[in-house]
Amino acid sequence: MKKANTMKICQTCLIGFMLTTAAHAAERAALPQVAVKDGVITFFPGSPESGVIPQEQIEGKKLWVDAVRRDGKTRQIRITSYVGKPGIRIPIKFRYPFGDASATWNMDVRREGDIVSVMVPWNGTLIGDLMDVNEGEESTAAARKKLGLTEPDSKLPVMYSSGDSISMGLWPHLEAELFDKVNVYYQRELAKDIPNVGLKNNGHAHLAYGVLQKAYTNENFKPDCWLVNFGLHMINSHHNKLPAYGEWVEKFIAYAKEKNVKLIFVNTTPYQQSFRPKQNLTIIKFNDLMKNAAEKANVPVIDLHACTLEAVKELGDKNVYMDGVHFHDEVRKRQAAYIAERVREIVK
C-alpha cells in the first residue's frame, strides 16, 4: 500500500447505494465501496485494488460497517449493530467469497455458499480478519499469532492502539497506512481476542489503563509498542484537575517501562472553536502537561492537535468537523497519514 497521498481511497455514501463523492468519481469508476441487495451486504463490490470503508452507516443508519482493502485483497471487515435495544440480537448476512480458512471471527457464523450469516447483539461488533483466500490458512495463522493469540512469529512489530472515538475513526486508515511497518492492533480487536476485555472506547485514562491491565493477564498479549490517546473524555471530570490528569500520564509512562514496551502518546484534538471554546483552553493545558512529562521520560508525543489545527486553517471549520468534535473522513485520512509518518520515524 502506498502512502495516503498516493492511495486511491474512495469515501462512500450509501444513498440508493451509489457513490456520491464527485471528486473521487471523476478519478475512478463510480462504484460504491459497500452495497446492500436483498438484505445481503457486499464489501468492495467493484473489487478495487485498494480502499477503506470508514464507518459507513447503512440500513437506516442502524448498522455501521468499515473495512480495509489493499493490494487487491480485502483484509478486514467490521459490522456494528445498533438495531433494536440492549439484549436484542439481529440476523445479518454478508457476502464472503474467500473461503473458510482465510478468516478469523469473533462470533459464531454460519456459511451457505458465499453468504455468511451471524446473529449480532445490539451495540455488538462482528470482526473478521484477513479476508482473502490467497492469504491462505498458514498465513492467517501466523498473523493471528502475532495479534496475541499464541506465540508471535511475524516479522512486523505489533502496535497496540488505544483511544477514544477519534482514534476509532482513524483506525481503518491508519492500518492501511502502516500495513508494511507494524500490525496495528486496535482495542476492538483486543476485545475480540481476549473475551474478558469488552470495552470499545478508551477515551478516559482509567478505562484505557484498566483494559491494558486486563490484557496483560493473558500471557500471549505481547505488543511491541503502545499508541495511546486519552483526554477528550476527561474534560468534564478533570477540567480543573490538571495534577490528576498528569498522574495518569505518569502512570502510563511507568507501566510501559514496567512492561518494557515502547510508548507513543497521541495528544488530544481540539473541539470546533465555536462549539466549546473554553474546553479548548483545557485541552491545551492537558497537551502541554503530557508533552512536558513525556519529554522528561523520553516518550514521543504525536501532535495530532497541531495537525488538526492545520487542517482547520487550510480547509475551514465546516469542512473539518462533522459535529464540533468528530471529523469528516478526508480529515481522518489526513490525520492517519500524519500519525503514520511519525510512527515510521519512531518504530525502527
Image (cartoon, rainbow, N blue to C red):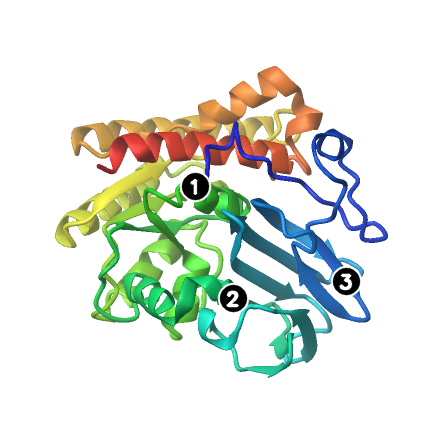
Give the crowd class for mark 1: few <14, some 14-19, many >=20 residues within 10 Å. Answer: many
Question: Is residue 52 toward the left or the right of residue 21 in the image?
Answer: left
Q: Number of callouts in the render?
A: 3
Residue contact between numbered discs 1 and 2, judged by CB atoms under 8 Å = no
Which three-letter amino acid code belongs to the residue tagged 1? Gly
User: In the rendered image, is residue 129 in sight?
Assistant: no
Between marks 3 and 1 in the image, the one whose residue lies nearer the viewer: 3
- Measured from the top left, where is residue 150 in percent x and y? 25, 71
Of labels 3 and 1, earlier in sequence is 3
**Residue 300 drawn at (x, y percent):** 26, 32
Q: Amino acid at mark 3?
A: Val
- The Cα atoms of the two marked residues, 1 and 2, are separated by 27 Å
Q: Nearer the viewer, residue 299 or 117?
A: 117
Q: Quadrant of residue 217?
A: bottom left
Reply above or below: 81 against 299. Answer: below
| Dot 2: element | strand
Q: Which residue is mark 2?
A: 127
Mark 2–mark 3 Cα distance, whole angstroms, equals 18 Å
List the residue tagged with mark 1: 231
Q: Disc 3 marks which residue?
A: 36
Would you call the spot at circle 3 few (<14 residues within 10 Å), some (14-19), or many (20 or more)?
A: some
Residue at the far top: name it: 313
Question: Residue 94, relative to residue 225: is it above or below?
Answer: below
Could you give the CA–CA distance between mark 3 and mark 1, rounded to whole angstroms?
Answer: 37 Å
Q: Secondary structure at mark 1?
A: loop
**Image position of 331 with respect to 258: above or below:** above
Who is closer to the viewer here, 303 or 57?
A: 57
305 vs 5, nearest the viewer: 5
Which residue shows up at 23% across the image and 63% down it? 152
Say what amino acid the circle numbered 2 marks: Ile
| x then y, percent, for residue 6 | 52, 29
